Amino acid sequence: MMQARPKILALYPRLPSMARAAGEKTAFKFVETLHGLGHRIVLLSFAFNGYDEKDYQALEPLCEKIVLHPFGSGEKLANVLRGWHLSPTLAARRSPGFGRLIDEHIAGCDLVHIEFTELLPWACHIKRRYPEKRVSYVAHDIVFQKKYREARRHLFLNPWRDLDLAMTWWSENRFLACADRVIVQNRKDAALIPRHRERVRVVVPYAQTAASEDSSVPPPISGRYLIFYGAMDRPENYLAAISFLRICWPELRREFPDLEFCVLGARPHDRLREFDGRDGVTVTGFVEDPNAYLSGAFLTVAPITLGAGIKVKVLESLLSGSPVVAFPAGAEGIDVGPREGLTVVEGYREMTAEIRRALHGALPDRGEIRAAARRAFDWGITESFLREDYR
C-alpha cells in the first residue's frame, strides 16, 4: 500500500500565479508539483489591496483550502514599526492576524512550506510554537546580497544604511537557522549562506520555454535587433536599460545604423518610455508572447548590476535560443558558458566590444543554446527533490 504524503501548510506573501513575475510562476509550479505528488495543501496568503480572482481560481483545484489575509499599506507600516529592529523587508508581513491563521490551520499539517524572503520570519514563529512541525523554506534570493549591491551604488558613507545592512545580515541568518530545510535555486545562493550548508539543498527555478522551436511566425521586429527582457518597473531592470541606452547604444548605433534595440517587459518606467521610437529603440510594454521577440533577436543583453537571485528572464532568453551578453549580476546562478550562449563581461566597455565582436562574427548554434539551458534547468530536478525530501 502506498504511503500517504504529508499534508502541507503552504505560506505565501501573495498568491502564486502563472500570469505574474518569474518568482510567482516558480511558486505556482511548486504548488502544482506538490499536488501532483499527492500532497494535500492548505495555502495561506496575504492579499495586498485585494487579489486577482483568476489567480485564486487557478489554485483552487490544487489546494484543499485557500485562506487569504487582507493586507494594506497601513498594516504594512504598522508591522515595520513594530519590527523596528529588523530590515523592513523581513518585518513588513509579520502581521498578528496572519499568525492567528497559522495557529488555526497548522494542527492537521505535517510540513510547513514557506516561500519568499518576506515570510522567512514565520519559520521562527512556527518552530517556537510547534517544534514538532517540519519547516522548509524556499529562498528566491538572499536579501542581504540585494541590499549590499544597492548600498555599493552610493559614494558616501551612511551610518543608517550600514546599520540596516548589519541588521539584515543578522536577522536573515537568524531566521534561516529556524528552518529544517533551506531550498535555494542556484549554487551561488547556497554559497552565500555557508553557516547553513548542512540544511541547504539546491533546486532549479521554473522558466517558460517556447511552445515550438520552429515557429513560422515572423519576428515582430524586422532586421537585426538586440533585446533586453525583464519586468521594466523594477529598478534593477529599468536603470540597467537606461544605462545601456546612454553608454553602449550610441556607439553601436553609429557603427551599425540598421541595428535596433528592443526593451521587452511589462510596466516600463516613465523614464524608460522616453526612449521609445528614438534611434531604433522600441519599448514594448507587456506582450502576450515574449518568445516571439526572444527567438528573433540577434542576441540578448543583461547589463544588470542590482538585485539578487537568479535572473529567470536571462534563463528564458537562453531557452529560446538567444545568445546572452550579461554583467555578473545578470548571469549569476546560470552555470553555462560562452559555448552554450552565455558570455559574462565586467563593464559597459567590455559589453559594447563583445556585442560588436558578435555582430562581425559567428554566434553559437541556437539549438545547442536551448539544449544546454534545458539540461541545466530541467524542472524535473526540482520535482525529483520534492518527491524524495517531502516524505
Image: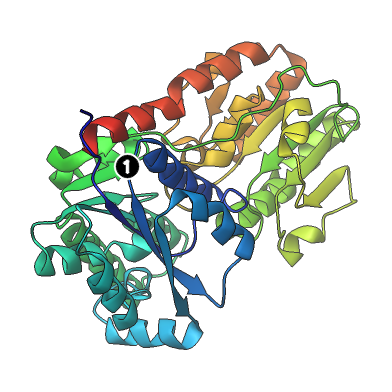
- Residue in the picture at 54% in, 13% down: 339
Residue annotated with mark 1: 184
Tell me: 188 left or right of 391.
right
- Residue in the picture at 15% in, 49% down: 180
Residue at the extreme front of the image, as rendered: 1
Of residues 144 and 184, which is closer to you in this image? 184
Q: Is residue 140 at least partly visible in the picture?
A: yes
Q: Would you place residue 216 above or below residue 383 in this image?
A: above
Q: Would you place residue 167 above or below residue 112 in this image?
A: below
- Residue in the picture at 19% in, 52% down: 110
Q: Is residue 166 at least partly visible in the picture?
A: no
Q: Position of residue 89 (x, y in %)?
A: 37, 69
Quarter of the figure with the C terminus: top left
Instruction: Assess disc 1: are there few (<14), some (14-19) or many (≥20) residues with their C-alpha within 10 Å of its C-alpha.
Output: many
Of residues 62 and 160, which is closer to you in this image? 62
Q: Would you place residue 273 above or below residue 48 in this image?
A: above
Tell me: 129 left or right of 206.
left
Q: Position of residue 101 (x, y in %)?
A: 31, 74
- Residue in the picture at 59% in, 33% down: 316
